[in-house]
Image (cartoon, rainbow, N blue to C red):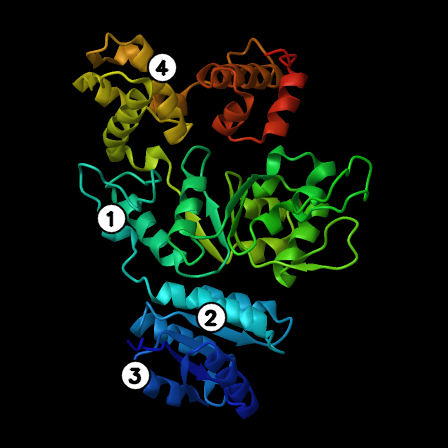
Amino acid sequence: MNKQKHQVLVVDDEPDIREVLELTLGRMNLETRTASSLEEARYLLGEFKFDLCLTDMRLPDGNGIELVRHIQDKLPYLPVAMITAFGNMETAIAALKAGAFDFVSKPLDLSDLRNIVRSALRVAQSPTQTVAAVGTQATTAVAPSVGSRRLFGDSPVMQKVRAMIEKFARGQAPIYISGESGTGKELAARLIHDLGPRLDKPFVPVNCGAIPEQLMESEFFGHKKGSFTGAVQDKEGLFKAADGGTLFLDEVGDLPLAMQVKLLRAIQEKTVRPIGAQTEIKVDVRVLCATHRELQELVRQSRFRQDLYYRLNVIQLHMPSLRDRPEDIPQLADVLCARLTETLGIKSPRFTVESREALKRYSFPGNVRELENILERALTLCNGAEITPEDLHLPVVSKQDAETAVLLDGEESLDDYLERIERVAIENALVKTSQNKTAAAKLLGISFRALRYKLEKLGMSGS
């Protein structure tokens, strides 16, 4: 049985480059058609079906980004890889923002080219694996569904998030996932990985705020045995562990400036050098990052490098807070309650009308993570048949009251007041997370290191 070969469109005005690409792709058992201009490429795209397009940036009658936009408009499921001049990251980033799947630099590294082609063809073969295909019915409202990883909610804002995840998963561009603590940023990153061409390769998450500064270079890039005191064996590092897959940098805003420089180079050059090694190692990693902090503000404060910000923020995905989608709260409560009771091996109680309304009124500063903690506590307090507002133990101060509350009573200084509020917030977070400091830090929207500092400063380090 003859299997039909994949078809690739090669667009370049240099005959030598076209010949190299045709030979390389031919050895991969791919069929090619070539064009030397935008006009010729548009004609071929209208006449033939392709699985991949490789285009140069500079063309006689325009540039490759125009072709990327044309394909995005007319053939959105056709992956496009851009051929750029060596070292021209601005062009590469512009191509990725326009919708290019990936890029390869001249002079062509044929190994990189083959990797990009294989990844792009995997995307081209699975256009039906989408977020929308999983469904958003009111009974389950899940998408995508990979194992137990799901995004719940029928609100317009969540439908938009799912559509963006589906689109972003098909490319290789770095993505900056923003949003408050507890909104599901890591879940979104995992779904982007699972729905993309790297799903059979590692997904490696790392909390940048939890790694001691003196160990960061070793953690990210690895080290050779004997390269420093305590290096008793070789270590490959997180970049190497994620080779071929996805590296998710959570709380990337907590990286110190010295590490930001090294991270930028690793991302741009696609190489790492372990501590003590004489040579660099090539790595093929898609980088996704997240933070609850505003990276642009950190750039303005000179606490985050602008060049790294632009390299990571090629595409942005914002995860909405529960305050932005209160209509999803009852459904989320049902799903989380069912999941918790299944784990506990008990029958799921029903929510009273009053408890559902109480949940919808509450502002949830800790978002979905806080909702889960509240429900876990309610299950231990309820009578087993139903969950009442009393079982939820929600703060009595409403969102509106909190916004209009008088901040100072005139009996204490501003510093004392702020210290008191900070102490209460930390105590509440520790109670809600059963004294788990890592979880409490996430609930508070700060790094673990910042929480540890505040505990010492407030004399709460024994908490």
- Secondary structure found at label 3: loop
Examine the rendering and report whether any part of residue 91 can be seen: no
173 shown above or below 291: below
Residue denoted by label 4: 377
**To which quarter of the image does residue 72 belong?**
bottom left
Q: Earlier in the sequence, mark 3 or mark 1?
A: 3
> Which of the marked residues, 3 or 4, is nearer the chain's N terminus?
3
Residue behind mark 2: 117
Task: Give the CA separation, mark 3 to mark 2.
Answer: 19 Å
Name which residue type carries label 2: Val
Relative height, residue 62 to residue 368 (above, below):
below
Q: Can residue 104 be seen in the rendering of this structure? A: yes
Q: Residue at x 23, y 31 (%)?
A: 331
Which three-letter amino acid code belongs to the residue tagged 4?
Arg
- Which disc, if any, is residue 134? 1
Q: Amino acid at mark 1?
A: Val
Query: Mark 2 and mark 1 in contact (Cβ < 8 Å)?
Result: no
Q: Quadrant of the N terminus?
A: bottom left
Say which of marks 1 and 4 sits in front. Answer: 1
Which residue in the rendered view is the most extreme toward the front? Answer: 1
Which of the two discs, 2 and 4, sits closer to the camera?
A: 2
Q: Nearer the viewer, mark 1 or mark 2?
A: 2
Q: Residue at x 64, y 42 (%)?
A: 255
Is 365 positioned to the left or the right of 84 in the image?
left
Residue 48 numbered mark, or none: 3
Circle 2: element type: helix
